[in-house]
Amino acid sequence: MAFPNDLSDVVVFKIHPAIGIARLSANDDYFIFGSDPGSYKSNNLMKRQAVQFRVFAYGDNHVGLGELFPDLMDSLNITAVWSAKVANRKIANQLQQPLAGAPSAISAEASSDTKGGRLTGSLPGFDEGGTIPLGQITADGVFIPPKTGVFRKTAGADVPPFPGSAAVVDNTCDGMVTVRLMKAGKPLDVLPACIVVCAHDFSPDVNADRTLLDYLKEKLQISPTASPGNLHNQAARALDEAALEPGTPRFFPGIEVSLEENTEVHDVKGVFYQNSQDPRIDPREMRVRYKSTPADQGAVPGQLTSGLCSPWQSDYIACVAFWTDHLPAEVFQGVSSSGSVMLFRKKASDTSPSAETLTTGNDFLKVDQIGVARMRSGKLVETERTGDIGDGTV
């Protein structure tokens, strides 16, 4: 006998994607990354992007044995409780507070079996910091990002221009997602995943010439000629790579993560599991290692995103057309259109080159209402634009 009939040949379980990227929005609605969202907007707003985490079994020599589906858990009498531990360290980083015990880190942890898995942090000393939502982990392993928010030390203060401020913070975050698997009263060995909660991708069909996936493969020295493994290995790795492919490797300040220069992650390889240190790790693997104690090697929640702008809207003020894979400045109104329009214009009807665009931090509080740039017949075309940018604030 062997998996999936029993666990006799299982060495370890691993969660995939190893790094999931969720994207927040002011919308109540969300879709799960990798599924067809139908449309990227509803209620005149971008949808949030959630992440479905899945569990795979591995045997000796990193051989994939298959996915531990929910119905298989039932047949094997395995119970599962998902949990997440995340933080926003943007202000802590600006104030050069330590990785352990930083008073300005906004942190939260929750399990799917209590309080609906909702992660809620706070920031003492901030007028708007009493309750800061950081997401939700569900009983079936879905991480749902929070509705986007801006939280000010002084209530109602303007969102500052680039590079942001230590007096205004958002609710992006990063951290660990894991699942407690129990069989016959004993825990099973599980390697956790990482979740990154970041800002939007307004051009979902376009990736950078050199992606976050390319960057991490280089930094972690993953050989391009490594054996692909069996179909189960390939299925798990496809989840990992698909999650990273839309990410950008330019990290100052960055959109998904901030690494190396001007950040709290100077040694990228040092915050990842490594095969030379842990035999459970496949040499082709890209899995963030979170510390169990302050003395451990690895990352702490919030460290991977701590070098990003606080709040993220401040980055958007300066970087429209710089992060071209996420924030293209100009798009076509249709496939047959010969002229371009400003994607971030305030009035949908103003298609002139001098159209008034979102320019301030307060403007970008309403960025969810712009259109979505989609690739159509080789052209980047504006879609799902339903009207002018409103006057509401977040």
Image: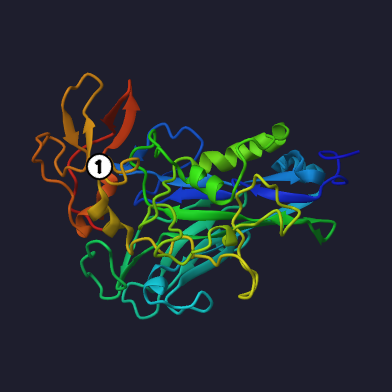
- The image position of residue 347, as x and y in percent, is 14, 41
Q: Give the number of marks.
A: 1
Rendered view: 309 above or below 228: below
In which image quadrant can residue 112 be found?
Answer: bottom right
- The image position of residue 270, as x and y in percent, is 59, 62
Rendered view: 92 above or below 313: below
Q: Report the side of 166 relative to 5 (left or right).
A: left
Q: Nearer the viewer, residue 219 or 393?
A: 219
Q: Residue at x 33, y 61 (%)?
A: 309
In which image quadrant can residue 334 be found?
Answer: top left
Screen quadrant of the C terminus: bottom left
Rendered view: 76 above or below 393: above
- Which residue lies under the disc numbered 1? 370
Colour basis: rainbow
Q: Nearer the viewer, residue 201 or 151?
A: 201
The amino acid marked with disc number 1 is: Ile
Regarding residue 59, the answer to whether it shows in the image is no
Q: Residue at x 77, y 40 (%)?
A: 63
